[in-house]
Amino acid sequence: MFNVTLPGTGGMLPLPSRFLTGLFVTHNGSALLIDCGEGMQIALAKWGCKLAHLDIILITHIHADHTAGLPGLLLSAGNYGKTSPLDIYCPEGAGDSLKKLMCICPEIPFEVRICELSVSGGSHIMWNDIEINSLPLMHRVNCLGYSLCEKRLPVFDPKKADKLGIPPKMRKLLHSGGTAEIGGKIYTQSDVVSEYRRPLKITYVTDTLYFDGVAEFAKKSDLFICEGMYGDDEYIPKMAEKRHMVFSQAARLAAAADVGELWLTHYSPALPEPAEYEEFVRGIFENTVVSADGQKREVR
Amino acid sequence: MFNVTLPGTGGMLPLPSRFLTGLFVTHNGSALLIDCGEGMQIALAKWGCKLAHLDIILITHIHADHTAGLPGLLLSAGNYGKTSPLDIYCPEGAGDSLKKLMCICPEIPFEVRICELSVSGGSHIMWNDIEINSLPLMHRVNCLGYSLCEKRLPVFDPKKADKLGIPPKMRKLLHSGGTAEIGGKIYTQSDVVSEYRRPLKITYVTDTLYFDGVAEFAKKSDLFICEGMYGDDEYIPKMAEKRHMVFSQAARLAAAADVGELWLTHYSPALPEPAEYEEFVRGIFENTVVSADGQKREVR
């Protein structure tokens, strides 16, 4: 199970009424943050997201609205008691700039490890037992989308185990994927389970030009968080030029990916009331939420 | 005349209820900012401070709570239409870090000129016709206090000019400091004025250990903005260790400097209600304001 908070929903500039976009996820007592624009620590404090157990930060790209809050956030995490190492993942070429940014926070009381991920193909990293995959996006600089997958064990079926005479002490081993030899016969997971469950999946995609590969990457996500700078389709050409998307493009990707729910985010500062487009965009993909700062949910 | 806004009053960390300290000053259509912690551009937008005519930034020191908002602020200034050069002054040794910070805003549509000021003695620079002086402070890193002085012409006295028979067309020249020869006699400013006026002066001091030189530097300021991390004197030893001050120390400096008004700022995140100490601190210096975010006044 994931607990998900959207600390902000703005793109480009933080506003008094809208923090910059990012995603805060907790899982089994550990926390992950995607992106860290200016004011992120303020937004996280406002929405009750604790920094003491922040273990990993994923940076989509080096633009200031996704990174400028990093030094302050690291200092605050230290002030709030963090001492364990923090891993920061970013696209190829962004690591040096992140290190430069950190010149104003030289005295952080924990280790910061920066790792660059490939932008020519997908990468695959682990956060505890969560699998994180990246997708190279099409922005003006190297940029990555991220998905988080929690693999779930299939449903244990005691009747099958009883029928095969598998002793109780071996059932947990088999259920979790091990093998056991009983009376000369090898048993595996499939002998004690009745139903496979697909992984819980959250996908986060911003900033990018529209392309079909995003739908493939977000396929069957329980929650798909995707950028939309404007609600009106008249902005499509202008946004394509700047390598961004509008609401309807995100909704079409959500429909093609067959996701559970779409959360729109990364609104232009020139869009004062994104919610005005909710009905329009739900006509394309029904389970769309035109997100607001502080939106939360459990993904389970 | 200066228009002065205190966009935030916090030290160390920005809070949902309190932005980081700084000072925004406008004078004759040009704007100056002192310090630029994380969220400064949000605070400035909230309090109606326009970035398009920001011409100069004074940085007290390199700590993140005074600098981390710089990249975002520069980008926003560009978005709000600024095209003319921006001068950034900072203490010796801080320039490189500021340049590193700017690695995430490489495409600013105006020139940024960074100039380091001495920390072994005072410096003297000009912002239009405003004289800016700096004072090396006693913090954990190189740090400067700043004062802004608007020299004012003495009061013109038409009776004196009439008595000496000075022709109307020469009066403005003499009043503004020129000399004129009339009938073989040299006249100067003192022949046409009746009263000299002291300069309008604003002094900004944070972060520092208490020392008497601050009072000398702030002498006769119309407005003295000074740090105070806590209202309670029991914090004096702890703050001295961290090279900071408490309210009563700022008030004693204000009294010694004989300033017009003291604005306290740079409160600890652990101090939720600074205003609770207002009566106490007014017992030391009556014209003290325990500032709140967004405080404004004209200094004239």
Image (cartoon, coloured by chain):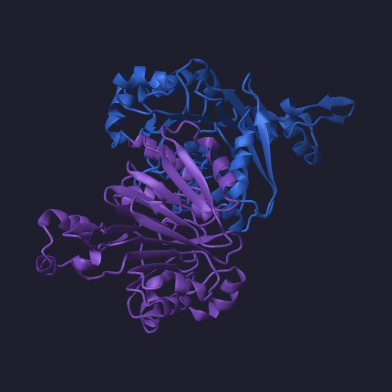
Chain colours: A blue, B purple
Which image quadrant for residue B18? bottom left
Determine whether, in the image, residue B218 is placed left or right of residue A101: left
Q: Please name the residue shown 27% across and 62% down the image.
A: B152
Determine whether, in the image, residue A88 is placed left or right of residue A239: right
Q: Please name the residue shown 54% across and 56% down the image.
A: B61
Q: Please name the residue shown 32% across and 73% down the image.
A: B260
Quarter containing the N terminus of chain B: bottom left
Q: Does residue B28 sit above or below A248 in this rendering?
A: below
Q: Position of residue B289 (x, y in %)?
A: 34, 72
Q: How many marks?
A: 0
Quarter containing the C terminus of chain B: bottom left
Q: Does residue A50 sit above or below B220 in this rendering?
A: above
Which residue sits furthest right? A184
Q: Please name the residue shown 54% across and 80% down the image.
A: B234
Which residue sits furthest top? A212
Q: Position of residue A172 (x, y in %)?
A: 75, 38
Determine whether, in the image, residue B190 is placed left or right of residue B91: left
Q: Which one is in front, A58 or A164?
A: A58
Q: Position of residue A239 (x, y in %)?
A: 38, 22
